[in-house]
């Protein structure tokens, strides 16, 4: 996978968007997983950038956080975050962007992209909950109740917004600014 300078800059910009939206974090009293806008950033990067650049964007985001840049929720950074309660969710971001981007590369219609986002969200929930359950020493269902149930409705709203906004931005960018 070879990216030119312009594409790398675009990926860095979207990694920055993910980092900025990660700071919109609401700690929940009943969960060690905060409510953030990261899912929105990941899904929209997949739609707008496509599979390759969406994937690279999220890998850049994770690498920045892993080396200590405070890009994760609540201005946190370091490899310890990736080995903590939310690490599985974060590590699934490139897969989410890859899947969504793959479908977005093929379709511009709302329905297939929204379905891809829901499937990607389910993958994120599964990987994140399995990791959380392992780290917290709890069963999968207990992890599911803490990590998924409180977030489903809000995340589905984010998916709907990201689908609509992402498709429209992608069309406008293709037409006016640069080719993604």
Image: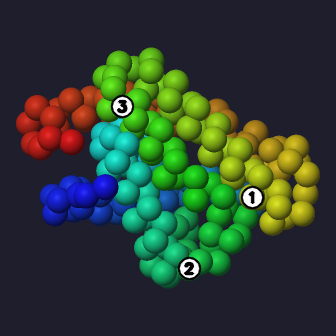
Q: Earlier in the sequence, mark 3 or mark 2?
A: 2
Q: Is residue 73 above or below residue 172?
A: below
Q: Residue at x 17, y 59 (%)?
A: 4
Q: Position of residue 172 (x, y in %)?
A: 17, 32
Q: Earlier in the sequence, mark 3 or mark 1?
A: 3
Secondary structure, mark 2, is: loop
Q: Is residue 105 above or below residue 74?
A: above
Q: Residue at x 31, y 55 (%)?
A: 1
Residues packed near mark 2 inside 10 Å, few (<14), some (14 to 19) or many (20 plus): some
Q: Which residue is mark 3?
A: 104
Give the number of the mark in front: 1 or 2. 1
Residues packed near mark 1 inside 10 Å, few (<14), some (14 to 19) or many (20 plus): many
Secondary structure, mark 1, is: helix
Residues packed near mark 3 inside 10 Å, few (<14), some (14 to 19) or many (20 plus): many
Q: Position of residue 33 (x, y in %)?
A: 70, 58
Q: Earlier in the sequence, mark 1 or mark 2?
A: 2
Q: Residue at x 43, y 57 (%)?
A: 58
The answer to whether residue 141 is left or right of residue 86 is right
Q: Which residue is mark 2?
A: 78
Residue 18 appearing in the image = no
- The number of numbered badges drawn on the structure is 3
In space, the residues marked 3 and 1 are separated at their CA atoms by: 28 Å
User: Can you tell which mark lies on residue 131?
Assistant: 1
């Amino acid at each position: 996978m070879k990216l030119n300078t312009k594409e790398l800059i675009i990926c860095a910009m979207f990694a920055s968007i993910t980092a900025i939206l990660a700071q919109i974090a609401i700690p929940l009293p009943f969960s060690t997983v905060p409510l953030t806008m990261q899912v929105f950033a990941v899904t929209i990067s997949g739609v707008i950038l496509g599979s390759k650049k969406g994937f690279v964007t999220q890998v850049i985001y994770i690498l920045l956080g892993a080396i200590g840049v405070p890009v994760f929720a609540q201005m946190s950074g370091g490899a310890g975050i990736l080995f903590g309660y939310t690490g599985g969710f974060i590590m699934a971001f490139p897969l989410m962007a890859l899947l969504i981007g793959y479908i977005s590369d093929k379709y511009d219609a709302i329905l297939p992209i929204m379905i891809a986002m829901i499937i990607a969200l389910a993958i994120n929930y599964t990987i994140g909950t399995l990791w959380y359950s392992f780290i917290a020493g709890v069963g999968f269902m207990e992890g599911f109740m803490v990590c998924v149930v409180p977030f489903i409705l809000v995340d589905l709203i984010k998916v709907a917004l990201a689908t609509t906004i992402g498709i429209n931005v992608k069309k406008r960018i293709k037409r006016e600014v640069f080719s993604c």
